[in-house]
Image (cartoon, rainbow, N blue to C red):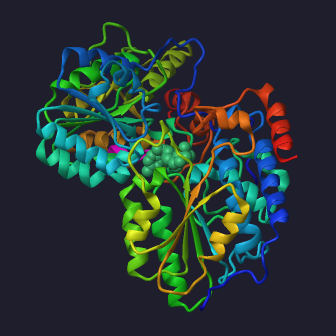
């Protein structure tokens, strides 16, 4: 049967969907980087013709001589960043996640990670955040990047965490890959939240028998789902894995041991990302429990609005809720 | 001079201009009410698409898989609006489905996919077109087919290394059945072209291509340039198109954020009226 034609459409470059009642912050990445640039003169900012769409323009406006647009040349972006770092700069690079990972992979691995180059990659609009179809959707970026040695990988939950990460990575030696969010980014975590490299954190402690392990903005969705499920009498807790690499094996295992069943949720394919990392950790620890994988299938995805894509491919709020309430 | 597959007669310029106007009308209709989009690029490339599809290109819309067709490879997937407009004008798509462009579940998404009749490649990740076009040209020669390959790509794509790898490949493999149509519209995502790409024509010449540079919104010049690109001489052909984003609709030409234009719902009727009056 033909797909029904929906009234929604592919929208402008990937602002996160407005969810009723959520507070948002505009361009948390760029505004924080502009501030940090005042304190750290060795910071430089780069983009590959995606300045406007990666939110780095506040840095350009504050520090015009330390900002470089290399044009639509992602491999060059990463090589130049590596070169800058070898002369003492901390190079913050931006474009969409998909063009970093698929186009410039070898350059991230060799020019950057292998040399422990001080390059901080803010890879925008990961997963289904981008409505422009498979060519723009980094749905296997965590899988690809975790395959590179000596690379740190961070998937922040919201504006609160993203701002802390912008500052934290300046002091993390070597190359860092961050899944960045742009535009009006929701504020989901409390002010008291503190990002810690390599530490998964319980961001919703509801007790109960269901443990949710999640990353990126799916952690915010998991918290929403957990709250709704609690209203319907099913308690659950959420562990946010903000750092994908190095992976907090001990933290994940300690959390998993507390629950009868688990849900793992990510804005990524269920192969090669958080789900795979969790299953590997549990297996190695000899833990066998029912586990529901919420994430994307191994496929190329179409164009459309974020709400439409998330509903169609099973990573939206109703999907999370079903996993908690019905255990499937 | 031995020439390759090409149209029998001379071009009917008024008819081609009428086609281009129709493409522009169709694109405004498709974009109407959607608030934003890549309309400026579409209006800029309309004349070139009319010249290709209604004069130079050999194809059979009823048989998109015809092995001896000429290939038109649109490398800039974000120009989808223009591609769908010309595919409808050429008979590959139904006009009735065009307004669904960009809508959820539509067969005509914001970026081109090669399951759409008449579309030869998955567009959207830029810098893929020319290399694939070189491969198609090589295979057509290998099979002894008369077909040619026309590959559109953008000034932004001249910044991708892959484009230059393909540029060298085309000369190495003597792809004289390949015509590059380089849309130099002066803009890219962040605004005016940000890196030094000029002199484009001299670069292609230096890389072993027969190169000409034309006003890409001048139908007579386009038709001449295409006629000049038919020779079987062992060299790939490049036509550097200087186009104006928004051509035909002065209000859009004047927009400084032309890459991704925002248009209020209330503005469309005025833009359509402008198009009619500039061509009137
Ligand atoms: C490999 C790749 N990098 C980045 C992008 C994001 N992007 C989409 S359009 C565009 C501008 C490319 O320049 P051009 O085609 O000349 O733009 P236009 O004339 O349409 O403004 C960019 C950088 C992309 N689609 N593919
Ligand atoms: Mg351009």
Instruction: Residue at 35% x, 25% y: name it.
Output: A60
Given residues A16 and A217, the one toward you in this image is A16
Instruction: Residue at 30% x, 21% y: name it.
Output: A63
Where, quadrant-wise, is the N terminus of chain A in this rendering? bottom right
* In the rendered image, the vertical position of residue B121 relative to residue A169, given as above or below: below
Q: Position of residue A86 (x, y in %)?
A: 12, 40
Give the number of callouts. 0
* Left or right of residue A125: residue A113: left
* Left or right of residue A101: residue A300: right
Q: Is residue A139 magenta?
A: yes
Q: Position of residue A322 (x, y in %)?
A: 55, 31
The residue stretch that appears in magenta? A138-142
* Left or right of residue A96: residue B179: right
* Left or right of residue B216: residue B96: right
- Residue B39 visible? The answer is yes
Instruction: Residue at 39% x, 19% y: name it.
Output: A28
Given residues B64 and A80, the one toward you in this image is A80
Classify residue B178 by image quadrant. Answer: bottom right
Instruction: Residue at 28% x, 27% y: name it.
Output: A65
* In the rendered image, the vertical position of residue B183 relative to residue A137, given as above or below: below
**Residue found at the very far right of the displayed protein:** B280
Q: Position of residue A142 (x, y in %)?
A: 34, 43
């Amino acid at each position: 049967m033909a797909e029904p034609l929906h009234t929604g459409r592919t929208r402008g470059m990937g602002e996160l969907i407005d969810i009723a009642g959520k507070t948002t912050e505009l361009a948390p990445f760029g505004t924080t980087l502009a501030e940090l640039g005042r304190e750290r003169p060795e910071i430089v900012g780069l983009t590959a013709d995606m300045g406007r769409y990666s939110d780095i323009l506040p840095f350009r406006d504050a520090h015009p001589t330390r900002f470089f647009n290399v044009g639509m040349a992602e491999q060059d972006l990463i090589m130049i960043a590596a070169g800058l770092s070898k002369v003492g700069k901390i190079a913050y690079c931006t474009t969409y996640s998909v063009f970093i990972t698929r186009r410039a992979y070898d350059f991230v691995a060799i020019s950057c990670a292998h040399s422990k180059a001080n390059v901080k990659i803010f890879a925008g609009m990961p997963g289904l955040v981008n409505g422009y179809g498979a060519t723009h959707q980094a749905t296997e970026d965590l899988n690809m990047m975790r395959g590179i040695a000596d690379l740190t990988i961070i998937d922040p939950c919201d504006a609160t965490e993203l701002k802390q990460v912008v500052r934290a990575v300046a002091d993390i030696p070597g190359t860092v890959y961050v899944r960045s969010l742009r535009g009006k980014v929701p504020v989901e975590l409390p002010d008291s939240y503190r990002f810690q490299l390599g530490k998964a954190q319980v961001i919703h402690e509801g007790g109960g028998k269901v443990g949710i392990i999640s990353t990126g903005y799916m952690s915010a969705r998991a918290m929403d789902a957990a709250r709704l499920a609690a209203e319907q009498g099913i308690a659950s807790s959420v562990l946010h894995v903000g750092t994908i690499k190095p992976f907090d094996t001990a933290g994940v295992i300690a959390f998993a041991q507390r629950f009868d069943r688990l849900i793992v949720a990510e804005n990524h394919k269920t192969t090669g990302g958080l789900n795979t990392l969790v299953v590997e950790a549990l297996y190695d620890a000899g833990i066998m429990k029912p586990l529901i994988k919420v994430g994307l299938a191994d496929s190329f995805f179409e164009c459309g609005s974020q709400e439409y894509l998330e509903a169609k491919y099973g990573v939206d709020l109703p999907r999370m809720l079903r996993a908690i309430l019905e255990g499937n | 001079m031995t020439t390759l597959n090409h149209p029998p007669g001379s071009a009917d310029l008024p008819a081609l201009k009428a086609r281009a106007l129709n493409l522009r009308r169709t694109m405004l209709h498709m974009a109407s009410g959607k608030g934003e989009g890549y309309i400026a690029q579409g209006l800029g490339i309309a004349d070139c698409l009319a010249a290709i599809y209604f004069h130079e290109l050999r194809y059979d819309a009823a048989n998109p898989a015809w092995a001896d067709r000429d290939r038109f490879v649109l490398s800039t997937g974000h120009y989808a609006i223009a591609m769908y407009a010309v595919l409808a004008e050429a008979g590959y798509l139904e006009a009735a489905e065009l307004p669904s462009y960009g809508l959820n579940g539509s067969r005509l998404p914001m970026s081109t996919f090669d399951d759409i009749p008449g579309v030869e490649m998955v567009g959207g990740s830029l810098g893929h077109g020319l290399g694939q076009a070189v491969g198609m040209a090589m295979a057509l020669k290998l099979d002894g087919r008369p077909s040619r390959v026309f590959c559109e790509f953008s000034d932004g794509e001249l910044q991708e290394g892959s484009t230059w790898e393909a540029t060298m490949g085309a000369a190495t493999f003597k792809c004289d059945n390949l015509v590059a149509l380089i849309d130099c519209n002066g803009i890219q995502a962040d605004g005016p072209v940000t890196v030094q790409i000029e002199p484009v024509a001299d670069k292609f010449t230096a890389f072993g291509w027969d190169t000409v540079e034309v006003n890409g919104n001048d139908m007579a010049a386009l038709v001449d340039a295409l006629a000049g690109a038919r020779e079987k001489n062992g060299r790939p052909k490049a036509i550097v198109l200087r186009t104006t984003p928004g051509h035909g609709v002065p209000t859009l030409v004047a927009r400084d954020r032309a890459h991704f234009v925002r248009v209020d719902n209330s503005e469309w009727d005025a833009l359509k009226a402008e198009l009619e009056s500039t061509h009137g």
